[in-house]
Amino acid sequence: MATVAEQLRCTEKGQLTYHTKWSPRDVIDTSRPTAKVVRNIDLVFEIKSIKAALEAIDDDAQTFYKNMEEENARESRKEKEKISSVNVAVENSPFNFEIIMQDCDHLVYEEKRLTDQKIMENRQKFYDDIVRKTHEAAILRREQNMRERREKEEKERIFYEELEESSLRIRADLQKEHENIMRTRQQQDEERRKKLQLLERQRQKEIQDKFTKICTNIRNTYNSILTEIQSFEPKNCPEIAHSKIPVLLQSSNAVFKQTDLAQKELKHLSDEHVLRTQNDFEVLKSNQACVTEELAAVSELVRKNHLEQQELLKQQRLAAEAEKAQKAKLEKFPAVPKQTARACDQKYETLKAKMAEYESSGAKLTGSGSPELKKLVMHLSKSISVPIGSITGRSGSDIKRVSRILTNIVKGDQVTVGNKTMSTKGNSIAIKFAENLIAKKLVSQAITQVSSNFSSAFSIALIVIAVWAESADFGDLFLAHLQTRCIYAVPKYHKLSKSGGDDDLKKMGYEIGDDGQIEGQDIFLGRMSGLIRLYAAIIQSPAPPGVRNHPHGLANGWLWFAEFLNMEPIPDISTTVLFDFLEVSGHMLMKSYKSQFEKLLYAICYDFYPKLESVSDDKASLARLKMFLEKCMKEKKVPVPEGRLDKNFWNTYHSGQVVGE
């Protein structure tokens, strides 16, 4: 019995299996019926079932051994009593006791055998009860575990069902709360929007009133300027045309027109419009003060001129008398020749004559009644205008594409326009027309593009150089068109005639509208800046790959500086042109001429700049030029202009197509 308990206690995994093939060593006493009982058991118990079985086995075993000890004690007493009675009988009996003892021993042995058999039967019955009780306890424990598991699962199921119902209720409540919040927020947003609209209407009304008041002030100031000029005596005074009054009047007229147009067309005004209009009003008041000063100066000048004229007439009478006395002597000597004109002025006149010749030749082509020539002119115009309009500084491949189209046209090679192919080969008039048109279009492109984006001058300059390298006639025409639109590229100042009319302003570079209004000073200076920057960019830009000699290189920049610094400066434009030309070409001129160019910068700083200060009222332009010159003199170098394209740019590539190819 102890062996079975030991085997039950030695399990490791909480489960115990009894096998039918146990060896005799698994049971200490093989004579007992325990081995037979154990060999017939094949059960698997859980840990709790095993503990219950062990407790049951221990209780029954203690009771069994206690009963066995009591029974053995009774049997011993009985046996002793029998032995004592037998001994008494033997002593008193006349019989042969040896035979009797043998019979007694046999009876005792038989009785012992029967007793042992009964004991074994009881023991077998006891172990059968133990197995039965153990099996029943295991079954009860397993049923209890199953019942507890089912109860637990049922509780969990009920718990999760209640949890799901609760979550659904909470979700529904949250959804309702969210809808209420969104509804409230929409109402608040609507109220806020209405308040903002009301405030915006009030603000617009205030801005409109303020804008209207400023416009009224501008109109009154402009009328005062006109009245002051018209009431000036004497009428049609030529000194007015030579003063700043035409420019101031044109600027005031532009401000007035801009304000009047804004008042008519602008429906939604902002603080920016009011601020801009206020600035215009300040400019107009400044112009009014300048006009008053100029009129006073003109009046003083008229008075001085009148006195000088009277003095001159007096001197002329005295000189006439002296001339008659010396006439005989003067006739013996040849007349002194007039000073020869500057080389750049002669070249300018030559270029103008050449441009007029090409314009006349082109007029014959465009005015021809031949359908074929008209078609040729249309195709040429399209093949030139489209690529020029698509010039960008994106990559060298784009510049090469545009320049290839234009050079093919001037060389007479075939050019594809859309789905059609054309050529100017053998038609000299068409080639002249194309060269002149390309030059004119490039200058127009510079006016449109460079005036608003200075860095675009470098990409246009590369196109000009590429075409110029193929055709020297194109270069002359380009210079002619450029110098016609910007006389300061010669460099040259136009001398005003006594009449001081619109022709003089046009020759100076001003544009006059169909209504006779002169463009604003800022617009005029911006266009001149764009054109002079283009000319400077051409001078300092690298030649295309394969071109050994630059068609119009840095030497022309040195000549321009030499001629420009030898002229007396005029207000505003001289400062602007000098700064633009120096900023664009100064870096390469310094790199090429080094110390010589440093001397030129020194001459500008200490000789020419004081002259600019004495004639110019544009303090901002003077300050900008002064800062630039001081930086160059301090660092002993001229900075690289923003957007400059070096020789490596020709090798850059972009996969996109250029319009017109």
Image: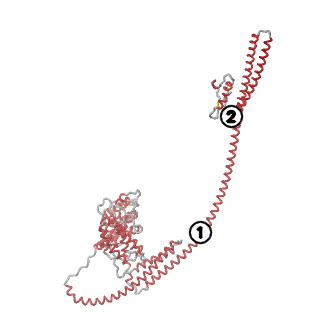
CA–CA distance in space, label 1 to label 2: 84 Å
Locate residue 152, reporting x and y percent: 69, 42
Q: How is the image coloured?
A: secondary structure
- The residue that disc 1 covers is 196
As rendered, which of 431 and 367 lies closer to the eye? Answer: 431
- The residue that disc 2 covers is 51
Answer yes or no: is residue 430 visible.
no
Q: Residue furthest left?
A: 332
Taking the image as shown, residue 497 lies to the left or right of residue 109, namely left
Q: Does residue 159 sit above or below 500 in this rendering?
A: above
Q: Does residue 179 sit above or below 337 in this rendering?
A: above
Q: Residue at x 40, y 87 (%)?
A: 234
Q: Sequence order check: which comes first, mark 1 or mark 2?
A: 2
Answer yes or no: is residue 597 visible.
yes
Q: Residue at x 39, y 74 (%)?
A: 622
Q: Amino acid at mark 2?
A: Lys
As rendered, which of 521 and 632 lies closer to the eye? Answer: 632
